[in-house]
Image (tube, rainbow, N blue to C red):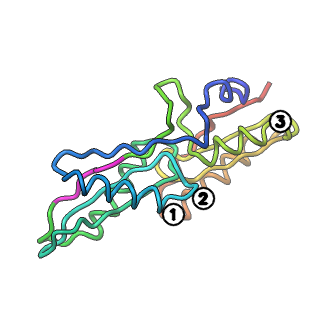
Amino acid sequence: MTTEQTLALLPDPERYRLVILDDGLTPQAVQDIGTMIIDGIGEDHFFGAIAAHVPANSQQLAVSVRAKFHSLEAAERAALSDCEEERTEEASDCRLIGQIEPEEWDEDTPQLSHDVMCALDQGAGEMDGPIFVARSRNTAALAIWSGDDTRQSALDECNDAASATGAEPDCDIVVDDAP
């Protein structure tokens, strides 16, 4: 997909929605979680996920929030993984309790994080030459390069960033202006 095609499909990168999956949560818990997440995520919006468990001998949820991913699925995997790392054997199971997503999106919307959408929305017109965007499918790693013969540089930088998190390099090019 080219930069022009991508920009035409992007939702407003500054608008997001927090969806609380409230099955089994009290109305007060839903409100408290919503307030905590909104206060805590700052400008690092979508895609994000919230997982939680109840520690042994507690009535308070232990919450894990992950944001800035390029897909909801990757954010959910990361939040659940964090939750499982914190959970003891005596605690309740981890479950997803929330999602952070663009306010308006569907299956045609490019799977890009808030950071990439903002960078393209605000800077694509000022970049010289073809633009290449690489993004990780499982981490928040990304790279944006412009200019002739920079496609591989974008891919290498993104894979290096993914590897730095301890993950396998899994980047692919999602915006490609090469002629």
Q: Residues within 10 Å of mark 2 (few under 14, many from 20)?
A: many
Which residue is found at the position 55% from the left and 58% from the top? 42
Residue 90 in the image: state x and y as whole percent: 11, 71
The one nearer the camera, 18 or 48, is: 18
Q: Is residue 97 magenta?
A: yes
Q: Which residue is mark 1?
A: 165
Disc 1, disc 2: CB below 8 Å?
yes
> Which kind of residue does numbered mark 1 sit on?
Thr
Q: Is residue 14 left or right of residue 45?
A: right
The residue furthest bottom is 57
Which residue is found at the position 71% from the left and 46% from the top? 144
In this view, 14 is above or below 93:
above
Which residue is found at the position 19% from the left and 72% from the top? 88
Q: Nearer the viewer, mark 1 or mark 3?
A: 3
Which mark identifies residue 161? 2
- First to last magenta residue range: 93-98
> Which kind of residue does numbered mark 2 sit on?
Ala
